[in-house]
Image (cartoon, rainbow, N blue to C red):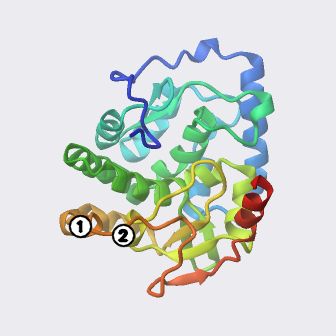
Amino acid sequence: MATAHQRPDQSDPVIDQGWEHYTRAEHGVWRTLFERQAKLLPGRACREYMDGLARLDVAADGIPDFRRLSDVLTKATGWEVVAVPGLIPDRAFYQLLSERKFPAGNFIRRADQLDYLEEPDVFHDVFGHVPLLMDPVFADYVQAYGAGGLRREREGRVHFMARLYWYTVEFGLLNTPEGLRICGAGIVSSKTESVFSLESPSPNRIGFDLARVMQTHYRIDDFQETYFVVDSFDQLFDLATTDFTPILQDLERRSTLEPGTVLPTDRVFHRGSGAYHAEKKRSAA
């Protein structure tokens, strides 16, 4: 079954970005997206993300040339950005991350798709992910995640790893002294979810727990019903030395939890009303 990273017919994913072929209109879409998120995120995105974004000054004027972007990123944390044409196979995805190479789509959404695109494009991948790869602790976590993903892919347990990535790297929240802040790329690259994830009364916001996250299904077609909150990036990096084997063996005996589930054992920052998704379900009936 394909996961959020996977396109099964694509075995050699890295391509030339073809930066010189982007049109003026495509650079304009980037600038529109960049400018509105740059205005929206202060006070919502975590400090580490905002610091990384400020240091990536090559990203403000149009779609970045990955070569120039990688020059800045490599000096900071040893990472580079490589171009791919879209979603790639799990094994290739994890292999690239384990080598500190972040795969970024080389295409950008159309002007009529500013608020939603099912497949991640260059704006999601670069604006969403790359600023936090400027943070040494988060950068090490993503590399460790890639190495762990390779092991689980060989074991046939990749769906557990996909859930971990989804609820941390893509849709994670961070607990800070100033309150909850966004760290997930899927949130910071989305105007509507940047607001929904923090300010809507509808979703649950639950303290991060590895087994709990790996047991929980996620939504790919709408806002999340639950956001998991990490206490620090060190909490994520500690996973690099965690033995997943007994946890995964236990999870294989359990049923998958639905996205909106709240357990009695959860550390609940906010128990959501569920109103948003309930209304969507009623409208679709």
* Kind of element beneath mark 2: helix
Outermost bottom residue? 264
Residue at x 25%, y 69% (from the top left corner): 247
Quick one: which residue is furthest to the front in this view?
285
Q: What residue type is labelled 1?
A: Thr
Based on the displayed image, in which of its 4 quarters is residue 210 positioned? bottom left
Residue 65 in the image: state x and y as whole percent: 56, 25
What residue do we see at 41% from left, 64% from top? 256
Q: Which of 150 and 54 is in front in this view?
A: 150
Going by the numbered disc 2, the residue's amino acid type is Leu
Looking at the image, which is closer to me, 173 or 153? 153
Mark 2 and mark 1: span between their CA atoms?
Answer: 10 Å
Q: Nearer the viewer, mark 2 or mark 1?
A: 2
Specify the quadrant of the image occupied by residue 15.
top left
| Up/down of 249 relative to 94, above or below | below
Q: Look at mark 1 in the image and give the residue it sits on.
A: 242
Please give the residue where the numbered disc 2 appears in the rendered image. Answer: 210
Image quarter hosting the C terminus: bottom right
Q: Can residue 42 be seen in this view?
A: no
- Asked if the residues shown at circle 2 and circle 1 are in contact, with their CB atoms under 8 angstroms apart, the answer is yes
